[in-house]
Image: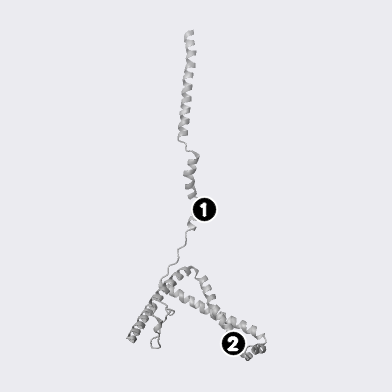
Amino acid sequence: MSASVLGGRLAAPAIKSITAPSRMVFNQSALLHSTAFRPSPTAIERHVRPTSLLQRPGVRMQSTSSTPKDDVKLDWNSFFKLRASRRRYSLASSVVSSLVSTTVGVQVLSSQDLESLGAQVMGLDPFVVLGMATAACGAAGWLVGPVVGNGLWGLVYRRFTPSVAIKEKEFFDRIRRFRVDPSTNSIANPVPDYYGEKIGSVQGYRQWLKDQRAYNRKRRNFIA
């Protein structure tokens, strides 16, 4: 009886001593297993940060807003219409600026001593001096007008400005390539629109090419 009790008392510590190391081994293996498959912070930063940056709305908006806008592509008829509208803007601004400069010039000159001014300018009559000065003011305004008109046209049609510049370069390259030699100009055979200023459409350009060929044909027949 005492032996069994003694054996039972001795058996319990033996079991505890056996199970304790097994728990330690299990805990160590679980710890090693969890740390072995746990990614390092640097690895998380390497693989997560780029994707998280791309998913941010701010970066996405910057990438979409940085794309350049496509220029408006024009056909030749649209180019000729815009070219004609630019001429109208230039003509209208020339008329307005000429009237303004003439009015301002007359008001300024009327307050001056025209008799002494006419005597200084080759002894001319004051009314002649006033007329010449008025004409000069109007001419100055007429010359300044196209600059103002082209600037105003560029503001109104600013989205078409790059495309018009490209088309205009191509157009003048064609004019320079196919226009006739003006050295053989004569009264019977004048040069037909050397700079292509009268061309206002594709049909007008084709007619211009026909006129150039007709000029060369007349020139060859006259020489022959």
Instruction: Give the position of the C terminus as an image quadrant.
Output: bottom left
Instruction: Please say if 215 is above or below 78.
Output: below
Q: With 177 as the anchor, is 117 left or right in this view? A: right
**Residue 42 position in % (x across, y down):** 49, 41
> In the image shown, does 17 or 182 lie closer to the viewer?
182
Instruction: Please say if 217 is above or below 29.
Output: below
> In the image shown, does 53 or 8 lie closer to the viewer?
53
> In the image shown, does 129 or 90 lie closer to the viewer?
129
Question: Which residue is pictured at 51% across the width and 73% down the height?
Answer: 153
Residue annotated with mark 2? 132
Badge 2 element: helix
Residue annotated with mark 1? 58
Q: With 119 as the anchor, is 23 left or right in this view? A: left
Determine which quarter of the picture holds residue 223.
Answer: bottom left
Q: Amino acid at mark 2?
A: Met
Q: Residues within 10 Å of mark 2 (few under 14, many from 20)?
A: few
Q: Amino acid at mark 1?
A: Gly
Determine which quarter of the picture holds residue 133.
Answer: bottom right
Question: Which residue is pictured at 48% across the width and 25% down the height?
Answer: 24
**Residue 142 position in % (x across, y down):** 55, 81
